[in-house]
Image (tube, coloured by chain):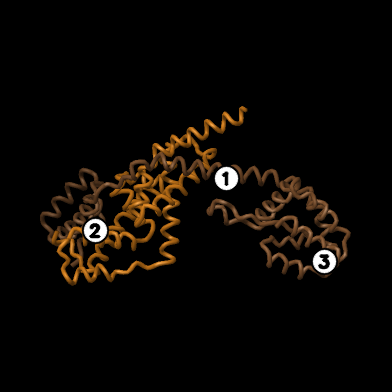
Amino acid sequence: MKPCKEFENRIPLYVSGDLSDDERRRMTTHLQHCQVCRQYHSALAAIIDTMQQEPEIEPPASYGAELVIALNNRLVKRRKNQRRALWAIPAFASLSAFLIITAVSLFKSGDNQWFEQFNQEHIYVNFSSVGYFGEFVPADDPADTDLSTEDIVKNAIYQIVEKEPLYPEVERCVIATASLDDAEFRQLVYQMKREIL
Amino acid sequence: MQKETVRQTDAESFNRLVLENQEKIYALFRRMVSSHDEADDLTQETFIKVYKNLSKFRHDSSAYTWIYRIAVNTGLNFLRRRKARQTIGFEKVELAAETGNPDIADFKNEALKKVLAQLPSKQQMVIILRTYQGLAFRDIGRIMDITENAAKVNYIHALKNMRKKFEAMGVSYETV
């Protein structure tokens, strides 16, 4: 049998102590006379009782300090990545105009397919849509691996630009691609590959 | 220099917020998941969101309520993702019911965890916040961005559903 309709929804709140004084008194009186509602009440009360008897959960003793350290480490990495991105944006903007010119040259050359293949064979980001490519460096933090294409592009440009002093050929290669034919371009890619890897 | 000082102050306030609230937030997640690592992941996810949104924090509500709200949303998203990818089986509990497991307390605790995990996300969250965390329905409403009444309705449905699920598993609470 089902508990009385009038009281059914109030019994859970009676169990949790959330009825007003008047409602609670009415419920107590009703339970004394209605066996079905009494059984329903005892079932719900037992469930809540079982839950409340479970031991309290406390984190391990040193958890608070460990959590602060872990969070601060993650935030330091995040700030570094943000600085990278911010630094890369002006570089990205200033390069864009030039890269568009490069792209036109590359698309005209009809050699884009080969270039894509090159990027797949090596861990290079496919920049062929703008006539540029860069080394992809996976993020240290697994939480940061879900990068958008734009983030990868920025990251790759950052890598190239920052490493420019180490690889002086790179910038010259990029600039040169605007006016190269296919064979010369392949030669430069080969040269870049040698310089970077 | 000034920027660094601001950042340092932010970091100090953030660390204080973490230390003051981590126990409750961890305990909330620990009721929802089966391992420390999962609870830790969710706790970290919550506090990273807290940090990202520190500038949006309006001081018209307490930091405690605000952090709880972020934690509850993180928890609800987790529960929805989990429900989408797995169904928790009842085999073990059913077997225990048939064979009359002598350790009735352990058996009921196990059944309780499974039943809780099967509740709709909001009902599960409300019953955890009310029963384990001892929050009032008014506060649960604020935290979950629902009315106090809606919090009560979720609680009522949660208990009803739990009883039905226990019955389906052959666990009778009437006899306790």
Instruction: Find disc 2 in the rendering and name its residue.
Output: B109
Residue matched to label 3: A107
User: A21 or A156, which lies in front?
Assistant: A156
| Secondary structure category for the residue under label 2 | helix
Vertical order, B167 against A141 (above or below): below
Q: What residue did someone put label 1 on? A: A78
**Dot 1 lies on which element?**
helix
- At label 1, the amino acid type is Arg
Q: Nearer the viewer, mark 2 or mark 3?
A: 3
**A127 left or right, relative to B144:** right
Q: Is residue A97 left or right of residue A144?
A: right
User: What x and y, as percent, mark residue A105?
Assistant: 85, 62
Chain orange in the figure, letter: B
For the residues marked 1 and 2, what is the alpha-carbon distance in whole angstroms? 41 Å
Where is residue B75? Give x, y as percent: 42, 53
Q: Could you tell me if residue B123 is visible in this image?
A: no
Q: CA distance from mark 2 to mark 3?
A: 66 Å
Residue type for callout 2: Asn
Q: CA distance from mark 3 to mark 1?
A: 37 Å
Are the residues at dot 3 and dot 1 in contact (C-beta closer than 8 Å)? no
Q: Position of residue A24 (x, y in %)?
A: 19, 47
